[in-house]
Image (cartoon, helix red, strand yellow):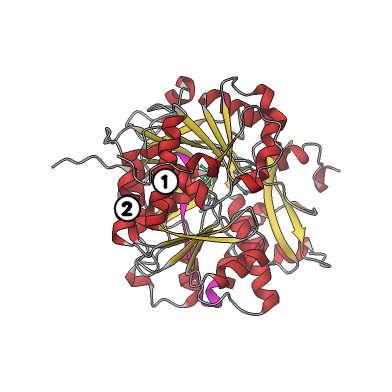
């Protein structure tokens, strides 16, 4: 039979199959909230009735601007389940980008956490006239918003029936919408369908049998407001895993306390978040009880960070992906032949971006689009194909026309190698590579090496213009408290792994690194900051 793959079926299944499965949330109201999957389904049904009452039609975009919590999760299912499109908005975008996105998506309703009400109030006059606002709290906590006709989330649910007749749709119906951060030009919207979402949840959920099963607990630090928290809201209920949502407190101490209190087994997030947790773990001299596994991706984690967690007994799984891939494309689980390798050889593999997921194909090509061998040496632009990969962008014909190559593969903009065992190594974003005298230098490799130097807490390597070499690498580093890292020492550490001409020409110390809306180091901002910088040999 051909049965359509529907998002609502994930939750109705979880409520039946895992009646004790729970969603635990650190709430914006300040306390910890818990509900089971059946209770969640009842509330999601109430919400779906409320959306119908607000005249939300199939295909309408309904936006969310919220932290990781149960109400945000409920919106995912109620909006998509009833046939509308759940448009998650990243609150770290600039006000101009927020205005652009809400207008471009033509959102009809916007659900907002109390924390982000001021963000919306400040731009409300530039948003579509007929857009309505719902604050995601109860009456007692409703802030004074100044927004016209504002509604209260819990009041919308009150008194609605606790079951809903979920419509069966074409599985290719749009279910979710997420805009890329748009470091160049306007943000671009990626649409996810019911089918792509369900398949992505299946393929990512089955990757971690040791931690992804009934009774286990996962904590997504990765936000629901960007690329669906790597699919956890769908994969966790499908596999019976409890979800622990951290709300807005993502500092090391708060995460440590929540991980321990809720006995979380597996936590997922970008490298910057784990640096904070690592500092707390070091300060307290121990791991949160029960914590076993960390999934890290979104940008390249430093080798030193992977080593630190692994040496404490946390399994680190490095993943790579992008918004247009729903987002996970590869995973860092070690193949069976690698499990007994010496520790350093294992770390060598874990630093790489991992192997492809079932359903994702990878190819690397040269400048003319010719395929390069998967020999671990040839580097080229990475293209992908798969059930959860986008074919273009929402209402953006110009960007869509450039998305796919002649063979219908999606261009990632990453430069990579793939070795004969299938391990992908991302060398750089093509725009972040440093081109010196016609040769490429990988900023990721240099950063990895620099992070091992004493006294460096965080760093980034960027290209700065050079009249003779075109570009030269500059190391921008954040020193550890009280430390004064030294370039000569960094060079000494790097010398074994790099040719002399590849080493950074200089090191500049800064207090912090600028981050993008998704918590990655913004190399674009850094390049602007150091536009007028003169390298030592040119002074
Ligand atoms: P944004 O969050 O900026 O909107 P994406 O999340 O889609 O965009 O970012 C995708 C890009 O992030 C990839 O193309 C790649 O360059 C980078 N990236 C993601 N994961 C990794 C990783 N594990 N290692 C290195 N780079 C990564």
Compare residues 293 and 41 and report the one nearer the observer.
41
Judged from the image, the secondary structure of the residue bearing numbered disc 1 is helix
Q: Is residue 443 visible?
A: yes
Q: Which residue is mark 1?
A: 44
Q: Which residue is mark 2?
A: 202
Q: Nearer the viewer, mark 2 or mark 1?
A: 1
Tell me, for residue 289, which label it has, or none: none
Dot 2 and dot 1 residues touching (CB under 8 Å): no
State how far apart marks 2 and 1 are (Cα): 22 Å
Residue 451: x %, y % from top left: 66, 63
Q: Counting other residues with Cα less than 10 Å from the Cα at mark 2, is it few (<14), some (14-19), or many (20 or more)? A: some
Q: Residue at x 43, y 48 (%)?
A: 43
Of callouts 2 and 1, which one flags the residue occurring earlier in the amino acid sequence?
1
The residue lying toward the viewer, choosing from 299 and 446, is 299
Task: Please report the residue visible at 56 percent of the width from the left and 68 percent of the height from the top.
Answer: 259
Q: Vertical placement of 113 versus 108: above or below? A: below
Q: Residue 337: percent from the left, percent from the top?
A: 33, 71
The N terminus lies in quadrant: top left
Find residue 531 and report its horizontal and vertical position in percent.
Answer: 77, 37
User: Does the magenta segment cover residue 312?
Assistant: yes
Per the image, label 2 sits on a secondary structure element best described as helix
Magenta stretch: includes residue 527: no
Residue 429 falls left or right of residue 511: left
Residue 303: percent from left, percent from top:
57, 64
Task: Classify mark 1 as within 8 Å of ligand 1 or not, answering yes or no.
Answer: no
488 shown above or below 400:
below
Which quadrant of the figure has residue 271? bottom right
**Residues in magenta, as a range:** 309-328
Q: Is residue 301 above or below residue 85?
A: below
Vertical arrangement, residue 508 with respect to residue 190, above or below: below
Q: Name the side, left or right, on which 208 lies relative to 75.
A: left
Density class for disc 1 (Cα within 10 Å; few <14, some 14-19, many ≥20) is many
């Amino acid at each position: 039979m051909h049965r359509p793959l529907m998002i609502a079926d994930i939750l109705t299944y979880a409520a039946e199959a895992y009646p004790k499965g729970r969603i635990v949330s650190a709430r914006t109201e300040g306390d910890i909230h818990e509900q089971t999957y059946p209770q969640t389904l009842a509330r999601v049904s109430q919400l779906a009735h409320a959306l119908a009452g607000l005249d939300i039609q199939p295909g309408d975009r309904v936006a969310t601007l919220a932290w990781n919590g149960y109400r945000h999760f409920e919106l995912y299912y109620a909006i998509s389940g009833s046939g509308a499109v759940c448009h998650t908005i990243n609150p770290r975008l600039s006000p101009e980008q927020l205005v652009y996105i809400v207008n471009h998506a033509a959102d009809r309703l916007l659900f907002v956490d109390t924390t982000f009400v001021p963000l919306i109030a400040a731009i409300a006059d530039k948003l579509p006239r007929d857009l309505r606002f719902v604050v995601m709290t109860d009456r007692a906590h409703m802030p004074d918003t100044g927004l016209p006709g504002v509604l209260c989330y819990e009041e919308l649910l009150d008194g609605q029936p606790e079951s809903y007749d979920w419509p069966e749709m074409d599985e290719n119906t749009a279910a979710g919408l997420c805009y890329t951060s748009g470091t160049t030009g306007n943000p671009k919207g990626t649409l996810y369908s019911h089918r792509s979402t369900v398949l992505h949840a299946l393929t990512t959920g089955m990757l971690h049998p040791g931690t992804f099963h009934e009774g286990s607990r996962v904590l997504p630090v990765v936000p629901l407001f960007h690329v669906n928290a790597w699919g956890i809201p769908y994969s966790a209920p499908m596999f019976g895993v409890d979800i622990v949502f951290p709300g807005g407190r993502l500092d090391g101490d708060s995460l440590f306390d929540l991980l321990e209190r809720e006995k979380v087994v597996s936590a997922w997030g970008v490298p910057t978040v784990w640096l904070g947790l690592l500092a707390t773990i070091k300060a307290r001299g121990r791991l949160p009880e029960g914590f076993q596994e960390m999934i890290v991706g979104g940008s390249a984690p430093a080798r030193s960070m992977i080593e630190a967690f692994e040496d404490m007994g946390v399994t680190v799984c490095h993943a790579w992906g992008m918004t247009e891939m729903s987002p996970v494309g590869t995973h860092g689980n070690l193949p069976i032949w690698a499990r007994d390798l010496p520790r350093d050889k294992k770390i060598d593999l874990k630093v790489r971006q991992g192997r492809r997921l079932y359903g994702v194909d990878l190819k690397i090509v040269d400048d003319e689009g010719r395929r390069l061998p998967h020999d671990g040496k040839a580097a080229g632009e990475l293209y992908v194909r798969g059930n959860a990969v986008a074919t273009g962008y929402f209402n953006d014909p110009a960007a869509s026309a450039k998305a796919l190559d002649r063979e219908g593969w999606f261009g990632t903009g990453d430069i990579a190698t793939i070795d004969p065992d299938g391990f992908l190594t991302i060398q750089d974003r093509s725009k972040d590579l440093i081109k010196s005298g016609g040769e490429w230098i990988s900023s990721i490799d240099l950063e990895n090496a620099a992070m091992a130097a004493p006294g460096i807490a965080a760093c980034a390597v960027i290209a700065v213009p050079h009249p003779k070499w075109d570009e030269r690498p500059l190391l921008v580093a954040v020193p550890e408290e009280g430390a004064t890292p030294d370039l000569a020492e960094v060079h000494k550490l790097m010398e074994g792994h790099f040719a002399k001409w590849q080493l950074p020409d200089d090191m500049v110390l800064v207090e912090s690194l600028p981050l993008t809306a998704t918590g990655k180091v913004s190399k674009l901002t850094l390049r602007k900051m150091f536009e007028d910088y003169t390298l030592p040999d040119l002074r």
